[in-house]
Image: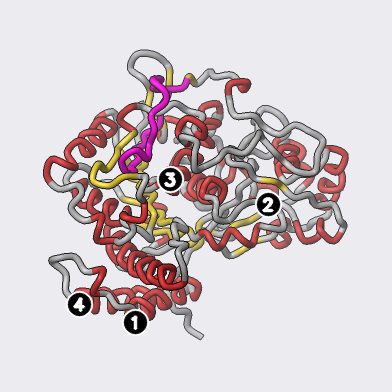
């Protein structure tokens, strides 16, 4: 049994899609020697099958159970997995796109069959009427008493199989009622587990499209929800990481996707989560060749990484940045780029992992085989890859299968060690950004606080809240933002 397990909790449709993408990607860990797959996966006591250490929460009817299987074999052949791109075309297309409004996503999207206890539905609201579950206050009280006991039992079932839980990984939508449910569940779990909590908050783009007035009202509700989520969940978490859908727009030059389609934008979110705390999933006996300046030769625990990223106990926000492992702009100038078409089941992490991973990475952004020589020559001419790598300040991580460097990369690129096994370094945290003195965080929190103050909050108050409570929340948000203001 692995010591240092991570249990993932996911609340809301967009979050659940993200979680499924995350575990689809993590399946490849079962065959990798440097990553301990048991951190994220549980083993069946009956056979060698695996299933996620995962709980999904949605409204009634939102999680459709279509499979009686409860695990996936670690020896599953590649033919049984989602198809990967292998053609000589300019774009990637895995298969016909799925309709996210009609397909049961667990059956259509998930590669791995889920354990029955993974599925948790809130019976008070129907998935057929999501507009009834938007205001933050609607999520209050749904887990009180007997209502939440089944959910807690499902968590205990996963927790009791663990040797020592190193973290709870929470993925939740921040702009609707699920944030309140997530906060309430964390409060219940305080007596169950003392491990650190890493929270990823996702905006769901679940807007109301019935005229300007309705849209404006939803925007106000969205703002209140985001402010309350930040206030409550950040105080319950060791690290709080916002992932925002609008940031995906900067990838349009490289990826073709529908920004309003949660099945596609969640691919970037899943890539971010998968890579963010990867050192917490390494085997503890890595060789010196697989170490980095941040992590050293052993697995780094979540509490260690989270403490390094916190500014203070009350300032624990963190952003994630994207770095592509080659100079995209230079390749654009040489007119050798291709655009990737993302589909509902696209797996940005895919690749067999046995061959030339560098080629997989190149193919992953649409380069044809005969064009790889150009990219090799471009990279081999760089005296310092890190300085010429395209780095974007964005709450997303690298969405490419650059999982292992090949011997050729190690030889050709002087700074290959910085790309080795996706390990972050002090000079380039592949995903996580240390945010002490981060104006980006400061401006984001300050904007929420200012608009939070100006919105009429009466419609959003619960029975036991007053306007004074909201003034206190506004002051607290400003205090958080001030801790990230950069000294000019």
Q: Earlier in the sequence, mark 1 or mark 2?
A: 2
Separation of residues labelled 3 and 1 (CA atoms): 43 Å
Residue beneath disc 2: 255
Label 4 vs label 2, nearer the camera = 4
Q: Residues within 10 Å of mark 2 (few under 14, many from 20)?
A: some
Residue beneath disc 1: 454
Separation of residues labelled 1 and 2 (CA atoms): 37 Å
Spot occupied by residue 444 in the image (x, y as percentages of width and height): 45, 73
Q: Report the residue at 23% width, 46% height from top.
A: 124
Up-down relation of residue 404 to residue 51 (above or below): below
Residue beneath disc 3: 300
Q: Earlier in the sequence, mark 1 or mark 4?
A: 1
Spot occupied by residue 32 in the image (x, y as percentages of width and height): 56, 30
Query: Can you see residue 410?
Result: no
Separation of residues labelled 3 and 4 (CA atoms): 43 Å
Determine the secondary structure under disc 3. Answer: loop
Residue beneath disc 4: 467
Q: Residues within 10 Å of mark 1 (few under 14, many from 20)?
A: few
Query: Can you see residue 407?
Result: yes
Label 3 vs label 4, nearer the camera = 4
- The way the protein has been coloured in the rendering is secondary structure
Q: Badges 3 and 4: C-beta atoms under 8 Å apart?
A: no
Tell me which segment is drawn in magenta. Answer: 50-72
């Amino acid at each position: 049994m692995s010591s240092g397990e991570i249990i993932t909790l996911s609340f809301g449709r967009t979050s659940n899609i993200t979680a499924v993408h995350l575990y689809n990607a993590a399946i490849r860990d079962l065959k990798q020697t440097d990553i301990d797959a048991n951190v994220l996966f549980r083993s069946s006591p009956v056979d060698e099958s695996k299933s996620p250490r995962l709980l999904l929460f949605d409204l009634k009817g939102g999680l459709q159970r279509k499979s009686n299987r409860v695990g996936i074999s670690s020896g599953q052949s590649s033919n049984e997995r989602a198809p990967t791109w292998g053609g000589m075309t300019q774009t990637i297309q895995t298969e016909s796109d799925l309709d996210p409004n009609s397909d049961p996503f667990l059956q259509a999207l998930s590669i791995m069959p889920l354990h029955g206890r993974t599925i948790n539905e809130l019976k008070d609201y129907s998935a057929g009427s999501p507009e009834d579950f938007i205001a933050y206050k609607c999520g209050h009280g749904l887990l009180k008493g007997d209502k939440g006991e089944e959910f807690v039992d499902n968590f205990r079932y996963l927790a009791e199989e663990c040797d020592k839980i190193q973290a709870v990984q929470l993925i939740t939508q921040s702009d609707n009622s699920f944030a309140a449910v997530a906060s309430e569940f964390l409060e219940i779990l305080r007596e169950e587990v003392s491990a650190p909590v890493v929270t990823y908050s996702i905006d769901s783009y679940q807007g109301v499209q019935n005229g300007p007035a309705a849209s404006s009202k939803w925007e106000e509700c969205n703002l209140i929800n985001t402010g309350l989520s930040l206030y409550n969940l950040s105080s319950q978490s060791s690290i709080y990481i916002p992932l925002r859908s609008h940031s995906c727009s900067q990838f349009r030059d490289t990826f073709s996707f529908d920004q309003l389609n949660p099945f596609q934008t969640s691919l970037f979110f899943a890539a971010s989560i998968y890579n963010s705390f990867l050192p917490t999933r390494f085997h503890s006996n890595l060789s010196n060749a697989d170490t980095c300046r941040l992590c050293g030769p052993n697995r780094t625990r979540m509490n260690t990484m989270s403490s390094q990223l916190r500014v203070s106990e009350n300032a624990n926000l963190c952003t994630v940045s994207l770095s592509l492992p080659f100079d995209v702009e230079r390749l654009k100038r040489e007119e050798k780029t291709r655009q990737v078409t993302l589909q509902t089941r696209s797996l940005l992490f895919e690749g067999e992992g046995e061959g030339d991973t560098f080629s997989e990475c190149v193919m992953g952004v649409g380069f044809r085989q005969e064009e790889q020589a150009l990219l090799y020559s471009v990279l081999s001419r760089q005296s310092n890859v890190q300085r010429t790598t395209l780095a974007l300040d964005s709450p997303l991580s690298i969405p490419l299968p650059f999982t292992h460097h090949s011997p050729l990369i190690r030889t050709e690129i002087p700074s290959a060690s910085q790309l080795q096994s996706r390990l972050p370094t002090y000079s380039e945290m592949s995903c996580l950004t240390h945010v002490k003195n981060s104006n980006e965080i400061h401006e984001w929190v300050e904007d929420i606080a200012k608009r939070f103050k100006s919105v009429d909050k009466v419609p959003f108050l619960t029975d036991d809240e007053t306007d004074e409570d909201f003034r206190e929340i506004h002051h607290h948000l400003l205090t958080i933002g001030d801790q990230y203001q950069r000294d000019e």
